[in-house]
Amino acid sequence: MVERKTALFGGTFDPIHLGHTTVASDAARHIGAEKIIFIPAKRSPLKVFLPKASDDERLAMIALAVAGNKNFDVSDCELKKPAPSYTLDTIRQFQADYGSETRIYWLLGADSVDDLPYWHGIAELIDRCNLCTMYRGGCEPPDFTKFKAAWGPDRVEKLQRNIIETSLIDVSSTEIRDRLAAGRDVTGMLHRPVAEYIRERGLYRLSGES
Ligand code: ATP
């Protein structure tokens, strides 16, 4: 039976930027995945602040950024559920929907490694799918060896094996929001249609500005 590989890429995407799509392309090539599905979270269980842009706006910006890339797709499955959304539940859902011929991967950036112990059902999540950690500009390369005592050597070995040496793109949504609020340039950080969308709607400006 031909096995399909689908990678899921969750995040707040407030807004989606060129860092996200560049590392996702690298990861797709490395894995041999035919689809990368971007999944905006309603609210990250680990982030204190709510997204600045609405669910619909974040979804629309992802749709603009992925349009034209036949390997990219977007799903609103987490936005339709009550917040917060748990990765484990999303993976269970995709595995049930796609069946056993599809191997599911979950992508995350190197900066998320230290958050993993706080993820809901992390041991089951590691066992259930391929959790692939991507390099991120400005961050140390991912390393899971310190989690051996907590998760056991087999899980740590699987996580290490699934590290992907993606391009180093030192861009974050926080920096983009800060720059936009200060009226500074964000050239080279955003997809052009996303930058247009933000400009037309006045997103991320300081409140009170017209
Ligand atoms: P924020 O600055 O608001 O925290 P962010 O830029 O980290 O946002 P998220 O939407 O939180 O973006 O990220 C979703 C996922 O993408 C996370 O797993 C994050 O580690 C990863 N990611 C984001 N930017 C990059 C990047 N430049 N390189 C590699 N991974 C990234």
Image (cartoon, rainbow, N blue to C red):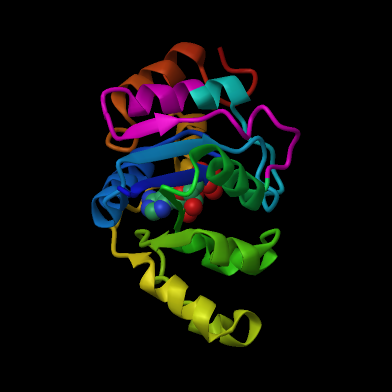
Q: Nearer the viewer, residue 107 or 97?
A: 97
Res 7 seen here: yes
Q: Main secondary structure of the magenta part?
A: loop
Q: Nearer the viewer, residue 166 or 130?
A: 130
Magenta range: 60-85
The picture places residue 188, in percent across and down from the top left corner, at 27, 36
The picture places residue 155, in percent across and down from the top left corner, at 53, 76
Q: Residue at x 39, y 31 (%)?
A: 73
Q: Residue at x 51, y 25 (%)?
A: 59
Res 172 seen here: no
Using the rendered view, name the quadrant where residue 164 is placed.
Answer: bottom left
Using the rendered view, name the quadrant where residue 44 is placed.
Answer: top right
Q: Residue at x 38, y 22 (%)?
A: 64
Q: Is residue 194 above or below residue 46?
A: above
Q: Quadrant of the C terminus?
A: top right
Residue 68 among those drawn in magenta: yes
The picture places residue 154, in percent across and down from the top left corner, at 51, 81
